[in-house]
Image (spheres, grey):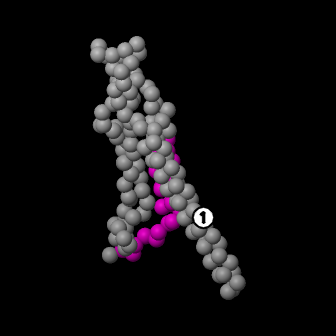
Amino acid sequence: MSAPRSVNPFSISASGMAAERFRMEVIASNLANAHATRTSTGQPFRRQDVIIESVGSPGRTGPDGAMGVRVVEVIEDPSPFQRVYLPSHPDADEEGYVSYPNVQLPVEMVNLLTAMRSYEANLKAAQAYRQMSEQALILLRGAL
């Protein structure tokens, strides 16, 4: 049995920051397309969401052997489009309804705030580890 790999808190925090940054980009795309009634496919824009999973390390001790996170995929939200009666709109159907994207601005704003706070938490963890490492070096220099 080999010894477990040492944990690198910087890479764990960096993986979290990268995943949350990507999540913020997808949320920004959702917000930018919240009123796009027609895309290149001819359909309204469909909201997207990011799937993130923890990355483990075999032989690691700890809660679940987590060594960071990674983005698995971007999925489309299957919820129905919002239908609004606007008979004069160029994208109105034969009944006069326009299908708008399934993007809900309050939900996207909450998701954006959550992603921002998660990014900040990972940044603070990396900063705290750096400060502890610097203090350990100072203590070691003083002992020599």
Query: Observer-nearest residue: 138 or 124?
Result: 124
Residue 13 vs residue 92, the one in the foreground: 92
Give the residue pinned by disc 1: 127
Residue 114 image offset from top left, x and y in percent: 48, 52
Would residue 85 be found to the left or right of residue 15 on screen? left
Residue positioned 45% across, 36% down in the render: 30
> Which amino acid type is shown beneath numbered disc 1?
Gln
**In the rendered image, the vertical position of residue 132 relative to residue 71, given as above or below:** below
- Say whether residue 119 is magenta: no
The image shows residue 89, relative to residue 99, as above or below, that is: above
**Hey, which quadrant is residue 131 in on the image?**
bottom right
| Predominant SS along the magenta part | helix
The spot of residue 51 in percent (x, y) is 37, 48
Q: Residue at x 45, y 27 (%)?
A: 35
Would residue 77 be seen by someone viewing this image from the given angle?
A: yes
Tell me which segment is drawn in magenta. Answer: 2-25
Comparing 6 with 80, the one in front is: 80
